[in-house]
Image (cartoon, helix red, strand yellow):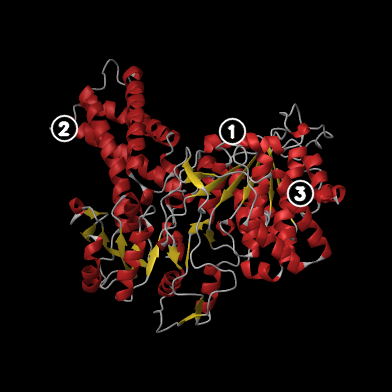
Amino acid sequence: MSRFLRHLPHHRVWQLGMDAGLVAAAWVLAFQLRFDQGLPVFYQTLFDRTIWIVVPVKVAVFVLFGFSNRWWRYFSSRDMWRTTTGVIAACVLADVIVYFAQPVGSLRLPRSIAVLDFLLTLALISGARMLARTLIERPNPLGLVARGREVLVVGAGSAGQLVVRELQRQPGFSPIGLIDDDPKKRNMRLEGVRVLGTTDELPRILHDNKPDEVLIAIPSAPGALRAQVVEMAQRERIPVRTLPGLAELISGNVNLAGQIRPVQVEDVLGREQIDVDLREIAAYVHGKTVMVTGAGGSIGSELCRQIAKVGCQRLVIVDHAETPLFEIERELVDERHFSAVVPVIGDVKNGAKMRRVFERYRPAVVFHAAAYKHVPLMEANPLEAVRNNSLATRTLAQVAAESGTEVFVLISTDKAVAPKTVMGQSKALCEWIIETLGHRPDVATRFVAVRFGNVLGSSGSVIPIFRKQIARGGPVTVTHPEMTRYFMTIPEAVSLVVQAGALGGRGEVYVLDMGEPVKIVDLARKMITLSGKEPDRDIKIEFVGVRAGEKLHEVLVSDGEQVAPTTHPKISQLTRPVVDPLWLDEQIAVLERLVAEGDTLELVSRLGGMMREPQRVGSTGEFVALLPPEARQLPGSPPPLPPATPGLGDRAKSDTDSHASLS
């Protein structure tokens, strides 16, 4: 026994000792209450001989039920139910042993003592734990002011209660009140903290109570509510912080205060939570080899994270940039414990290299996210825009079709709608390539494109630029006071992209619901405000003029396109006449020649002419009729390829060897 106790943690030893004392006290009180005039001699003997049976038996049952595994200071209502179950089991077992052991001849244990013992044991065991938690979490009885920073908590729901409880445990925080829009909760108390009013009354409450900070404890709060709270708090110059989200809140981290962070612009521009049908996604990704191009970029890396979650057999990540590819591979392997990942350094423009990659790994699903996206850079480098975006997409799509890939998903952009810039025109050409390949009867691969607008926080986007400008003290540069853009978080956009790949259809273009467009100048003002500064006073906003080819307002659908709903409320399907495949092949051949010759002016002119007057066909029948005879038949089976190299999950083969064989 002593050896067992030596190996127990210190807190478990004293908890077992306390439980043993409480069990003994309950047994004593049960006998004393049953015989209030004093114990008869026979029952005194029964008590003396049974207490040495009851205490070890009950403590042993408590150990089996894990009573000593939990700190008393964290005792909760869920622990209360488990404690009740353990006490019932312990009392029943002890009473049965005493009843049948008959330590005093034929004298049996009275039923009244058994009942009293159960009630007293339950009251003492659970009461001691509740008392310990209350004493630990009590406010400082000697202090004239609250401990630490005074916090006003917005949200009196389950998350708010958890936050208040955690803040009371932290020496640096003291919750002084709650805010909730449910009028029925007014003046009620959570963990001893009173609900002071609604968000409409927040200005008055802030003025009267003067908290050190406001904490938004509603993980599902819409962006409008967060923005309203931030605006009210800023008037009183009170900082606002928030919880990151419900999933992190209930992830098991006891120190919830450590998860509290400042409100970010993504929070105040927040959208409704996107529901993704993971089972439907798993149907076409689960157990398959999946390739992601541009895996080191903002969209590509998030694609890798989400695809790894749904259990693909192998994930081939392709990028021509070494450092980003290394970082996402390390994240997947070390942090997300997904080891079936193959990093391939390669350029998607290199058709021979891509064919070797497809022959070796035979990906069933391809997400093509590799692209140049910065408008001003592509305006200055149109040859590379067409080479890397348009021609590389055609190369990769053709290799995928030849290799028998099942699904090919292109990441498109709202800049492909009525494009005025080289970058937008090159991406519009990508959509045409996907549409024409997807409508060909002789191609088994299901090609789809997914179009959406700006994502928050991607490298080189407006938000990181604004953050750097604010950190330098300004000015924040905005192109035009009326400039608007659609915005979506990266995880949200990627989850919808993966969902769109499961919707079916051949040669379809899907459009994501981006919500309402946001004024860039309003975005700049919100970011300045969230940094604790005042726009135009602490940090100036300068308008620098619209850049070449840039539109004041981006749109997701052009005049000649029709929108139809899909099975997902946040994803729509575009319908439009398909581009003439023969005309497209001729134009791409010309563009390819111009890129090879380095004729920038002629390429820009040709590309603009294609966008202004594309040749389209009226129906699928007309489209098929334009194809060569050999391309009009449904495919029997894809051309045979050498068998896939076994065991990429065979990490015994080093990545270096894999790369060397592909180079």
User: In screen coordinates, is 35 left or right of 143?
Assistant: left
Pick the residue in front: 159 or 162.
159
Nearer mark to the viewer, of 1 and 3: 3
User: In screen coordinates, is 663 left or right of 520?
Assistant: right
The quarter of the displayed image where residue 629 is located: top right
Pick the residue in front: 586 or 662.
586
**Total numbered badges shown on the rendered structure:** 3
Who's the residue at 50% across and 43% down the image? 5
Amino acid type at image mark 2: Gly
Q: Examine the rendered structure and indicate whether residue 53 appears above or below residue 215.
A: above
Amino acid type at image mark 3: Thr
Which of the labelled discs sits on residue 38, or is there none? 2
Horizontal and vertical percent for residue 616?
A: 63, 46
Tell me the distance, in whole angstroms, between the alpha carbons under discs 1 and 3: 27 Å
Horizontal and vertical percent for residue 253?
A: 46, 52
- Which of the two discs, 3 and 2, labels the residue nearer the N terminus? 2
Reading the image, the residue beneath label 3 is 395
Pick the residue in front: 554 or 475.
554
The quarter of the displayed image where residue 465 is located: bottom right
Tell me the distance, in whole angstroms, between the alpha carbons under discs 2 and 1: 74 Å
**Circle 2 residues within 10 Å: few <14, some 14–19, many ≥20:** few
Whether residue 616 can be seen here: yes
Who's the residue at 54% across and 35% down the image? 280
**Circle 1 residues within 10 Å: few <14, some 14–19, many ≥20:** few
Tell me the distance, in whole angstroms, between the alpha carbons under discs 3 and 2: 97 Å
User: In screen coordinates, is 307 left or right of 517?
Assistant: right
- Which of the two discs, 2 and 1, labels the residue nearer the N terminus? 2
Residue reaching furthest left?
A: 37
Q: Examine the rendered structure and indicate whether residue 603 appears above or below residue 565.
A: below
> Element type at marker 3?
helix
